[in-house]
C-alpha cells in the first residue's frame, strides 16, 4: 500500500530527502520560520524603497534601422534629433492666433526646461504646402494646434515631477481658456499610476469563495492566500532592487504580481491538499508537512523550474525589453516556490491538527473515498467513462480547441495606439484632437532621413530630386513634406504622414514599403543611405523583430519543456503529448484574444475603444508564461499517474486513480488562477487587459478541455506505451523525481 495512504513506511524513507527534512524542520520550528519571513519582508521593503529603481519603457533596438536613422540625425542636427512629443491645443471660443503672446511665453518656457532641445511655435512654423491635406501644426480654422517639443532623452522616463515644469509652462494658455493636452511620450508620463489593488482584491475574493466551496475549511482557504501574498510582496521588493540595475518596463510589476499570485496560490494549495490528506491518513502534523514537501513539494519545485525556464526562454528573442519582462515574472515565481516550500509548512506546523476546525461545509481532501479505500468517487467514474470512449472525448476536445483557434490565422501584430486608451487619459484626448483636425496619420508621422555624407556635391541635387519624386508617389501616404537639407547639408530630412492611424496595418505596410522599396530605389546608384525613423517606425521595427523571433521562442520553450517532462516521467510519448497539447491550448487562447481585441468581439465591454492590433510582444509573453503554467497541471496530474503506474503497472487504472485525486484540486487551482488573471482585465492598460484575458482563457482551456478531456483520452489510447523510453535515451536524459514517486514505489515494494 502506498506510503501516502497508510501513514506507515520505513524510517529511511521518512527521514530521507532534502525537501522532506526541510518541510519537517519548518513545521517543527514554525515560530523561527514565520518570524524570519516577516523580518525579511520588512527589510526588503525598506531597502527597496531606499535603493530600488524605477520602471520605464525606455529601451532601444541598436540594430534596427529606425535607431540607426535617429543616430545619424542626432549626429548632424541635434535640434532635429532626439525624442519628440506634442502638446495639443484647442480653443472653441476664439482662434489660437489671438493667443500669440501666451503662445510665445509658453514656447520660451518649454525651451528652458531640462532635456528640451527645441519647442516649435505652431503660429510661426511653416504650415503644410498648399494643395495637400493640412497636417499642422495649425488647423485651417485656427482653433487646433500642436507644439512639437524635442527632448534629448525619452520624456516618459523623466518622472512625474517633470510634469510640474511642463504644467507651469503651459499655464498662460490654460488661463486664456485654451484646452491643453499632452500627446505621445509626455502623455504617457501624465497617465495615472497603475493601481492593481482592485484587481488583486477581486482575485483574492474569488479565490476565497472557490477554496471555501471546494474544500470547506476556512483555515485551508486562508493559508494559500496568505502565503502567496507574502511571497509576492517579497518578490516585488526584490524586483524593485533589480530595477536599480536594469531597465524594466512599466508593466513589469503588474505582470510579476499577476503571475506571482497565480502560481503562489496554486503551489500552496497543492502542498496544503497533500498535507490534509496525510493528516486524514493518520500522520502527525510535522510528519504530514514533511511528507507534503517530499511529494507535492517536489512537483512544486519541478513546476516552478519549468515556468522559470520557459520565461528564461524569452531571452532567445535577443530583445532586452522582452527578456527583462521574463525576468520580472520569474522573480515572483521564485519567491512563490520558496514560500510554498518553507512558509507553507511553517503555517501548517502552527495550525497543527486544527486545519479543519472552522468550516462552512464538511471538509474534503483529495478524494471522496475514506482513508485507505480505493477511490471510487465522481471523478473516478468520469475517468472510467473516458476509458470506454477515448476517441470521442479526444475528438470533442480537439474540436473545441480548433474552433477557438480559428481567429489566430488572421492575427495582426502591431502597437496599440493612444486612441484605444480611456478618454480620461490626456494622451487619448490629444490623440482625438490631432486626428480630428489633421487626420489620423498626424499621430504617427514617419521621419525620412537620407544620409548623403558620402555623395559628391555634384550629385546631391539629382539625388534630392529623385528621392522626392519617389516619396511623392508612395502608396498609402496622405502627405509627404518636401525634403530639406540639414544645416551641414549632409542629411535630407522629410516627413511622411500615413492616410491611416499609427496602429493600422496600412501604416505598418507604408513603413515597410518606405524602408524596403522606396528609399533603396531612391538612393540606388549613389553612396547615400535612407532610413525611416520616429516613434511609429521604431514600433514597426520592434514588431518585425519580435515576429521574426517568435518561432525561435516557441522552439526553445517547447524544447526545454519537452526535455523536463522526459526527464521527470521517462516516457517519450508522454513528453510529446504534453508539448503538442499545450501548444494547442495556447493556440486557442491566442484565437480568443484576437477575436476580442482585433475583431472587436467584446472589446468595448472590456473598456477598449475600437479594434486594436495585438501588441507585438504579447503572443511571445503569453507563450512563455502559459506554456510554463500549463506544465504545472501537467506535472501534478502526470506525477500521480506515474506514481500509480510504478506501483500497479495498470495504465488505465493509473489514469483513473490520478484523475480522481487531482481533479478537484486542479479545478479549484485553475479557477483561482483564472480569477486572478481575469481580474486584471479591469486595468486601464490595454496590454495588461490583453495579457489578463489571454492568460485566464488559456488556463481555463488547459484545466478543462485539455486536462479533463484530451489528456485522459490520450493516456488511455497510449496505454503502457506512454511510458516507453529508448534505452539509449534513458541513459542520456538525467533523472528528475517529480513527486518522490520512485522513492515511494521502492519503499512500498519493501
Image (cartoon, rainbow, N blue to C red):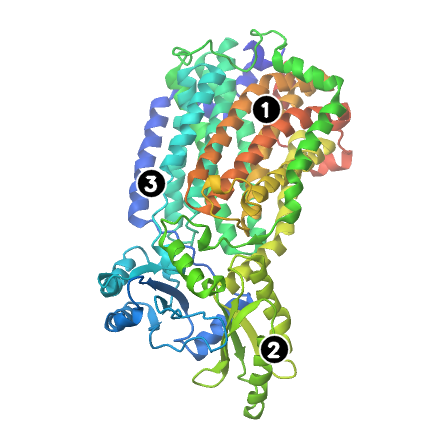
- Kindly identify which numbered label has been placed on residue 239: none
Residue 293 is at least partly visible in this image? no
**Label 1 vs label 3, nearer the camera:** 3
**Label 3 vs label 2, nearer the camera:** 2
The percent coordinates of residue 191 (x first, y second) are 35, 51
Q: Residues within 10 Å of mark 1 (few under 14, many from 20)?
A: many
Q: Label 3 to label 2, Cα distance in Å?
A: 59 Å
Q: Which residue is mark 3?
A: 44
Q: Residues within 10 Å of mark 2 (few under 14, many from 20)?
A: some
Q: Which residue is mark 2?
A: 470
The percent coordinates of residue 480 (x first, y second) are 52, 74
Q: Quadrant of residue 335?
A: top left
Q: Label 1 to label 3, Cα distance in Å?
A: 34 Å
Q: Residues within 10 Å of mark 3 (few under 14, many from 20)?
A: many
Query: Quick check: 565 left or right of 488?
Result: right
Q: Which residue is mark 1?
A: 740
Which of the image's four quarters has the N terminus?
top right
Q: Secondary structure at mark 3?
A: helix
Seen from the viewer's position, the closer of residues 283 and 62 is 62
Q: Label 2 to label 1, Cα distance in Å?
A: 69 Å
Query: Quick check: 105 left or right of 517?
Result: left
Which of the image's four quarters has the C terminus?
top right
Amino acid at each position: 500500500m502506498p506510503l501516502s495512504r497508510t501513514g506507515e513506511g520505513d524510517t529511511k524513507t521518512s527521514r530521507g530527502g532534502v525537501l522532506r527534512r526541510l518541510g519537517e524542520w519548518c513545521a517543527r520550528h514554525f515560530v523561527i520560520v514565520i518570524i524570519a519571513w516577516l523580518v525579511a519582508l520588512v527589510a526588503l521593503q525598506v531597502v527597496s524603497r531606499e535603493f530600488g529603481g524605477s520602471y520605464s519603457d525606455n529601451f532601444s533596438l541598436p540594430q534596427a534601422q529606425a535607431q540607426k536613422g535617429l543616430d545619424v540625425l542626432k549626429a548632424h542636427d541635434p535640434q532635429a534629433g532626439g525624442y519628440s512629443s506634442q502638446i495639443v491645443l484647442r480653443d472653441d471660443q476664439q482662434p489660437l492666433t489671438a493667443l500669440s503672446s501666451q503662445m510665445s511665453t509658453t514656447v520660451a518656457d518649454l525651451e528652458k526646461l531640462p532635456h528640451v532641445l527645441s519647442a516649435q511655435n505652431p503660429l510661426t512654423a511653416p504650415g503644410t504646402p498648399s494643395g495637400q491635406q493640412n497636417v499642422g501644426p495649425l488647423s485651417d480654422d485656427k482653433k487646433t494646434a500642436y507644439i512639437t517639443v524635442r527632448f534629448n532623452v525619452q520624456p516618459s522616463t523623466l518622472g512625474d515631477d517633470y510634469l510640474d515644469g511642463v504644467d507651469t509652462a503651459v499655464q498662460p494658455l490654460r488661463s486664456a481658456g485654451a484646452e491643453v493636452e499632452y500627446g505621445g511620450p509626455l502623455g504617457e508620463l501624465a497617465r495615472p499610476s497603475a493601481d492593481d489593488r482592485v484587481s488583486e482584491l477581486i482575485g483574492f475574493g474569488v479565490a476565497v469563495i472557490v477554496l471555501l466551496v471546494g474544500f470547506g475549511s476556512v483555515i485551508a482557504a486562508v493559508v494559500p492566500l496568505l502565503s502567496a501574498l507574502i511571497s509576492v510582496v517579497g518578490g516585488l521588493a526584490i524586483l524593485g532592487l533589480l530595477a536599480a540595475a536594469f531597465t524594466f518596463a512599466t508593466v513589469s510589476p503588474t505582470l510579476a504580481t499577476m503571475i506571482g499570485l497565480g502560481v503562489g496560490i496554486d503551489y500552496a494549495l497543492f502542498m496544503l491538499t497533500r498535507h490534509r490528506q496525510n493528516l486524514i491518513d493518520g500522520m502527525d502534523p510535522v510528519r504530514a508537512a514533511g511528507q507534503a514537501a517530499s511529494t507535492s513539494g517536489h512537483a512544486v519545485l519541478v513546476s516552478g523550474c519549468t515556468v522559470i525556464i520557459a520565461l528564461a526562454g524569452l531571452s532567445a528573442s535577443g530583445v532586452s525589453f522582452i527578456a527583462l519582462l521574463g525576468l520580472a515574472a520569474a522573480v515572483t515565481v521564485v519567491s512563490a516556490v520558496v514560500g510554498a516550500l518553507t512558509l507553507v509548512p511553517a503555517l501548517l506546523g502552527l495550525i497543527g491538527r486544527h486545519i479543519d476546525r472552522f468550516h462552512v461545509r464538511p471538509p474534503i481532501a483529495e478524494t471522496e473515498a475514506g482513508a485507505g479505500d480505493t477511490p471510487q468517487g465522481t471523478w473516478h467514474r468520469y475517468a472510467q467513462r473516458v476509458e470506454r470512449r477515448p476517441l470521442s472525448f479526444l475528438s470533442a476536445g480537439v474540436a473545441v480547441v480548433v474552433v477557438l483557434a480559428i481567429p489566430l490565422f488572421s492575427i495582426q501584430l502591431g502597437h496599440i495606439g493612444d486612441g484605444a486608451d480611456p478618454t480620461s487619459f490626456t494622451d487619448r484626448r490629444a490623440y482625438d484632437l490631432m486626428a480630428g483636425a489633421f487626420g489620423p496619420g498626424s499621430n504617427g508621422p514617419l521621419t525620412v532621413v537620407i544620409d548623403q555624407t558620402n555623395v559628391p556635391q555634384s550629385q546631391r541635387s539629382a539625388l534630392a530630386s529623385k528621392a522626392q519624386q519617389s516619396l511623392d508617389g508612395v502608396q498609402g501616404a496622405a502627405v509627404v513634406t518636401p525634403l530639406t537639407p540639414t544645416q551641414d547639408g549632409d542629411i535630407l530630412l522629410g516627413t511622411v504622414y500615413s492616410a491611416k492611424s499609427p496602429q493600422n496595418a496600412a501604416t505598418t505596410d507604408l513603413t515597410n514599403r518606405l524602408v524596403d522599396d522606396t528609399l533603396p530605389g531612391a538612393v540606388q546608384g549613389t553612396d547615400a543611405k535612407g532610413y525611416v525613423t520616429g516613434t511609429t517606425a521604431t514600433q514597426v521595427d520592434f514588431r518585425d523583430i519580435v515576429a521574426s523571433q517568435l518561432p525561435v521562442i516557441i522552439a526553445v520553450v517547447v524544447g526545454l519543456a519537452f526535455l523536463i517532462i522526459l526527464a521527470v516521467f521517462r516516457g517519450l510519448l508522454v513528453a510529446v503529448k504534453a508539448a503538442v497539447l499545450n501548444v494547442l491550448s495556447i493556440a486557442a487562447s491566442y484565437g480568443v484574444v484576437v477575436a476580442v481585441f482585433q475583431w472587436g468581439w467584446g472589446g468595448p465591454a472590456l473598456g477598449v475603444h475600437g479594434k486594436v492590433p495585438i501588441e507585438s510582444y504579447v503572443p511571445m509573453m503569453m507563450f512563455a508564461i502559459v506554456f510554463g503554467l500549463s506544465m504545472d497541471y501537467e506535472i501534478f496530474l502526470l506525477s500521480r499517474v506515474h506514481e500509480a503506474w510504478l506501483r500497479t503497472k495498470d495504465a488505465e487504472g493509473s489514469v483513473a486513480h490520478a484523475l480522481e485525486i487531482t481533479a478537484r484540486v486542479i479545478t479549484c487551482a485553475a479557477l483561482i488562477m483564472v480569477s486572478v488573471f481575469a481580474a486584471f482585465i479591469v486595468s486601464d492598460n490595454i496590454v495588461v487587459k490583453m495579457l489578463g484575458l489571454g492568460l485566464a482563457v488559456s488556463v481555463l482551456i488547459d484545466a478543462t478541455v485539455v486536462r479533463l478531456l484530451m489528456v485522459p483520452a490520450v493516456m488511455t489510447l497510449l496505454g503502457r506505451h506512454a511510458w516507453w523510453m529508448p534505452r539509449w535515451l534513458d541513459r542520456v536524459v538525467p533523472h528528475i523525481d517529480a513527486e518522490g514517486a520512485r522513492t515511494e514505489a521502492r519503499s512500498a515494494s519493501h
